Amino acid sequence: MTFTKTTTGPKALTLKTIPTNINLQIKGQGVLLFETKEPKAILTFKNAQKTDGLIVTFSERQVVVQRISNKDKFIDPNNVTGISKKSGATYWFSLDAQNQLIQAGIGEARAETLTYTYQFPNDKSASANKVFMESLVSIELTTIITPLRLLRDPITSSVPLLIKDARDLTMSDVAEGKVLPSSNLSPTSQRLYNCVSGDKFTLNTPDFPDFIQAIEYSIATPGLWCNKTLKSKEGEFGKSSDPAETYLRITLGKNNGESPGIPYVLEIWPVGHYSPIHNHGGSSAIIRVLNGSINVKLFPFLCDDKSGVEPYAKTDLKVGDITWISPTLNQVHQLKNEGTKDTCMTIQCYMYEVENDAHYDYFDYVDTDGSKKQFEPDSDADFLLFKGIIQQEWATRNNQKSNLNCFPFSFSFGSCSSSGV
């Protein structure tokens, strides 16, 4: 049984083989992520002596947890599902001795995907219950389960989408838990964040103060680069896909083999344009909005059933907002510019965690027919080349406007002359 550490999001272990017995990193706590193709899955948490523990059964109708020694069952009366019939579903179970809480869910391991919860009573049995839960040190699996990851820490609260720099954090921010301190990101994500979070990381610069306006002009004008390129990309995600299911990918730098595609990408989203529902190949990512706004829908897993799966969260990100993706959280999403005027422009940064040696160089997405497909991150243009093209288009436009402003004056040696007609 081989494990590889990762520190993205909640501290985790990647399972390299399929074990039948997994040791918890810390006694009495942890989260197991797994998948199964069967209508029932059973996990057994045991103490070191193998004399007591919890038998956790996921069935199509419910999750049932039973103590081995006394046969007590811990039922959530609101729980009505355990195994999903949706294709692509994954599952999780969280053990939390400190808070005397057990939970389960479908999809990413987070509070928003919770389907089962049981809080042990805070009565005279609390002390004995905690001793029992802290005695649990391992998980035994049946052969119908494929473990995906073991997280060190239990699920205790929602994880914020927005990142805030440590210099801007207040005590209320920490107490309310509505933003994620940048220091809580993994070292890989901090590296990406530090590259794009500065005040000078902007599109409009002294050498091209109208860059954003010029991009808008190129999108709106038939025959110009952005307009032509967007039209050429129609059908990129399936022949029957909506023409608005397109966006521009302008890459910065080179592919150094540490990311799915080139790690830094300027993505340009005209009004109404959107992406298919997709994941991010198990990479970490940082996304910053540079212009306009973008609507984000987050999904528990990538479902390739025709009926799909409902998002567990929706949010609008505006200029300056920065969000994040880890190998286990925020992986599956759909982006759409739901504004009415401004083109949205984002910087998307991707990188594999250091211990990721699989390097799955694709984003999986669901096409219009509900089928799961692979998209290899590509580039519509290098950033510096793109900027030069847009500058030239903008200069040509300004020259044309200048010439029109000269009418009805005559031209003399290529400039306006006031000698009249």
Image (cartoon, rainbow, N blue to C red):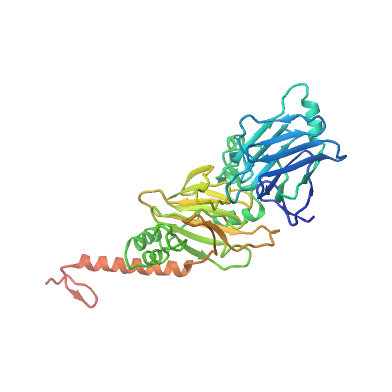
Point out the residue furthest to the right here. Answer: 49
**Does residue 209 appear left or right of residue 84 in this picture?**
left
Q: Where is 306 relative to 414, above or below?
A: above
Q: Residue furthest left?
A: 421
Residue 133 horizontal side relative to residue 258, left or right: right
Q: Is residue 24 visible?
A: no
Residue at the extreme top: 124
**Vertical placement of residue 395 versus 187, above or below:** below
In the image, what residue occupies the spot 45% across and 70% down? 385
Instruction: Answer above or below: position of 186 versus 111.
Output: below
**At 71% across and 39% down in the image, what residue appears?**
57
The quarter of the displayed image where residue 170 is located: top right
Q: Quadrant of residue 43?
A: top right
Residue 8: x %, y % from top left: 66, 51
Give coordinates of residue 53: x percent, y percent.
80, 36
Name the residue nearer the viewer: 49 or 145: 145
Point out residue 132 in the picture as x, y percentages from the top left corner. 81, 32
Q: Residue furthest front?
A: 39
Taking the image as shown, residue 159 lies to the left or right of residue 21, namely: left
- How many discs appear? 0
**Residue 158, percent from left and from top:** 60, 39
For residue 210, above or below residue 74: below
Q: The C terminus is located in which quarter?
A: bottom left
149 or 407, which is in the foreground? 149
Q: Quadrant of the N terminus?
A: bottom right
Q: Is residue 323 visible?
A: yes
